[in-house]
Amino acid sequence: MAKQLEKSQWGIFFDRITNALLTGKRAEIEVASLKLGDQIEAEWLPLLGISYDPKDDVLDVDLEGHDHQIRNPREIYVEAQGLELSSMEVIDADGTRHIVILRDPLALPAPSAAAAAR
């Protein structure tokens, strides 16, 4: 169930999340608005971090090869178990919804002994 974060918690929450567990996660970012419709902006790229800068009022979702900045976020909802963030939805000042879904990368099976001997 999604929980709304108070604006006073944004910086601390994302610093903690980034430092605790985002290593290795992949993210998909969908942007939805009446003007643009629904668009996938990034598809399962490695997540490097999420941060909020209160001075510039910008939430930054930093992916490998892509930087998604959300200016003037109005509301942030997160789905998390402790520090295990699974998704978030950010609504900016224009009413645009930025949906970020996180997942662990697919684990490849260990090479078999026969394949390793080749």
Image (tube, rainbow, N blue to C red):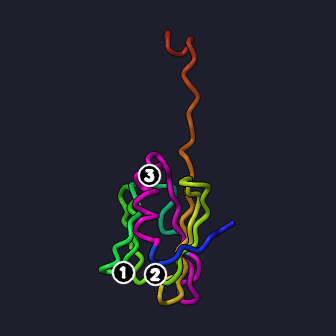
Q: Amino acid at mark 2?
A: Pro
In the displayed structure, 106 sits above or below 94; it is above
Q: Earlier in the sequence, mark 2 or mark 1?
A: 1
Is 18 in front, or is 65? 18
Spatial distance from mark 2 to mark 3, Cα to Cα?
23 Å
> Is mark 2 in CB contact (under 8 Å) with mark 1?
yes
Q: Which mark is residue 57?
A: 1
Image point 54% across, 88% down: which residue? 95
Image mark for residue 13: none
As displayed, is residue 115 above or below residue 42? above
Q: Is residue 111 magenta?
A: no
Q: Quadrant of residue 66?
A: bottom left
Q: Secondary structure at mark 1?
A: loop
The magenta segment: 9-38
Which of the 4 image quarters holds residue 37? bottom right
Looking at the image, tell me whether mark 2 or mark 3 is earlier in sequence order.
3
SS for callout 3: strand
